[in-house]
């Protein structure tokens, strides 16, 4: 895996998330999908959020821009230019969502309206967040489609989503997200439904646009290979909580949490043919019935007594870990169980 080397430690903070929690009512119980999560994103930085399915990655993104509060309860603080997006009225939040903070969803076919042409769908964003007239909106839509690499953009404005391939539909989604020149792009596993070749093209496109436009990105993925190639910093989630954060290079070369090490060991590299692939033992916990202590303790061979009694706090400076028995750097090889 190729690792990024950019250092954003001195860049101004663009977004700061503090003690963010999101829960949903399921019968008489509360399902806490995001549990007291805190992190920040610097200007121009690509932050990766990684973890198994159900760890809370996507709900974290939706909670940032207020999409989760329609169905659940969101608390904490999401500081954006001095304003808390968690408590901001929906009317004011709509002025930021789609303009300053845009989002690309995982499956474009379920996100794009099948009854509207892509030109109209790009135009909706431009109508809401810009002062362009009809001709200006059309010209901008063509410019955006060309920017994301869709050929014959003028004629394709009148096409419907089903007339595009999966990769091209994802490019349309990126064009819609970039319509108002956002400062922050939230990308929720934007390449999951694509083949490897197209996946590489889409990731390169997002990175190139981030660099050219000075746009920060939060990239949610379950693929550590993707994270290694694209992200400046990583945040590892498990059971709705952050368990490790830090510079991508440091987290991948010297992981301190056993869960991060398990994820790394699950990446098949230099494996002999017919060799059984490694998988983390056990299954992720039910968010309706989380353990009293560390959520990963039942799957961890290095758990200590304290792990079953209390939830470990996320501690450290540039490289943080939430573990009562973290890996001693330099003593345990990457991927050790």
Image (cartoon, rainbow, N blue to C red):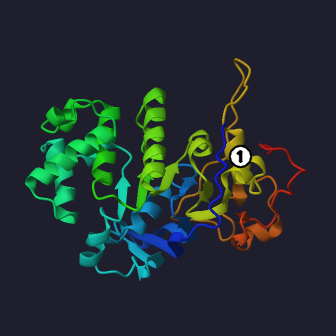
Q: Is residue 62 visible?
A: yes
- The percent coordinates of residue 198 (x first, y second) are 43, 30
Left or right of 249 in this view: 128: left
Look at the picture and state if 309 lies above or below 138.
below
Q: Secondary structure at mark 1?
A: helix
> Which residue shows up at 61% across the image and 39% down it?
225
Q: Nearer the viewer, residue 260 or 293?
A: 260
Q: Quadrant of the C terminus?
A: top right
> Which residue shows up at 58% across the image and 50% down it?
231
- The percent coordinates of residue 91 (x first, y second) are 23, 77
Q: Is residue 109 visible?
A: no
> Which residue shows up at 61% across the image and 64% down it?
242
Label 1, on which residue? Answer: 262
Look at the picture and state if 186 lies above or below 170.
below
Crowd tier of the residue under label 1, counting other residues whose Cα lies within 10 Å: few below 14, some 14–19, many 20 or above: many
> Which residue shows up at 21% across the image and 37% down it?
161
Of all residues, the one furthest to the top in this rendering is 273
């Amino acid at each position: 895996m190729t690792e990024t080397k950019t250092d954003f430690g001195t860049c101004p903070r663009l977004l700061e998330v503090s003690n963010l929690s999101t829960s949903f009512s399921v019968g008489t119980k509360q399902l806490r999908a995001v549990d007291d999560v805190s992190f920040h994103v610097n200007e121009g930085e690509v932050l990766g959020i990684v973890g198994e399915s159900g760890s809370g990655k996507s709900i974290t993104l939706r909670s940032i821009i207020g999409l989760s509060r329609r169905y659940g309860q969101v608390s904490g603080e999401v500081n954006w230019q001095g304003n808390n997006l968690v408590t901001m009225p929906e009317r004011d939040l709509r002025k930021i969502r789609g303009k300053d903070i845009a989002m690309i969803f995982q499956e474009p076919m379920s996100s794009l309206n099948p009854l509207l042409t892509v030109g109209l769908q790009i135009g909706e964003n431009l109508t809401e967040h810009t002062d362009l007239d009809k001709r200006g909106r059309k010209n901008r839509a063509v410019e955006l489609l060309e920017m994301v690499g869709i050929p014959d953009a003028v004629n394709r404005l009148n096409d419907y989503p089903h007339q595009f391939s999966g990769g091209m539909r994802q490019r349309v989604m990126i064009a819609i997200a970039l319509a108002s020149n956002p400062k922050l792009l939230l990308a929720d596993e934007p390449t999951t439904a694509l083949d490897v070749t197209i996946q590489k093209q889409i990731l390169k496109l997002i990175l190139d646009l981030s660099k050219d436009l000075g746009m920060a990105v939060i990239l949610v993925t379950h693929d550590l290979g993707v994270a290694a190639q694209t992200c400046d910093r990583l945040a590892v989630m498990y059971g709705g909580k952050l368990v490790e954060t830090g510079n991508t290079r440091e987290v991948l070369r010297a992981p301190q949490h056993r869960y991060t090490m398990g994820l790394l060991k699950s990446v098949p590299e230099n494996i002999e043919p017919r060799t059984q692939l490694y998988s983390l033992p056990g299954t992720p916990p039910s968010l309706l019935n989380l353990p009293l202590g560390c959520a990963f303790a039942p799957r961890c061979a290095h758990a200590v007594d304290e792990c079953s009694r209390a939830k470990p706090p996320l501690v450290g400076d540039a490289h943080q870990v939430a573990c009562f028995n973290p890996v001693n750097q330099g003593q345990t090889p990457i991927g050790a169980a």
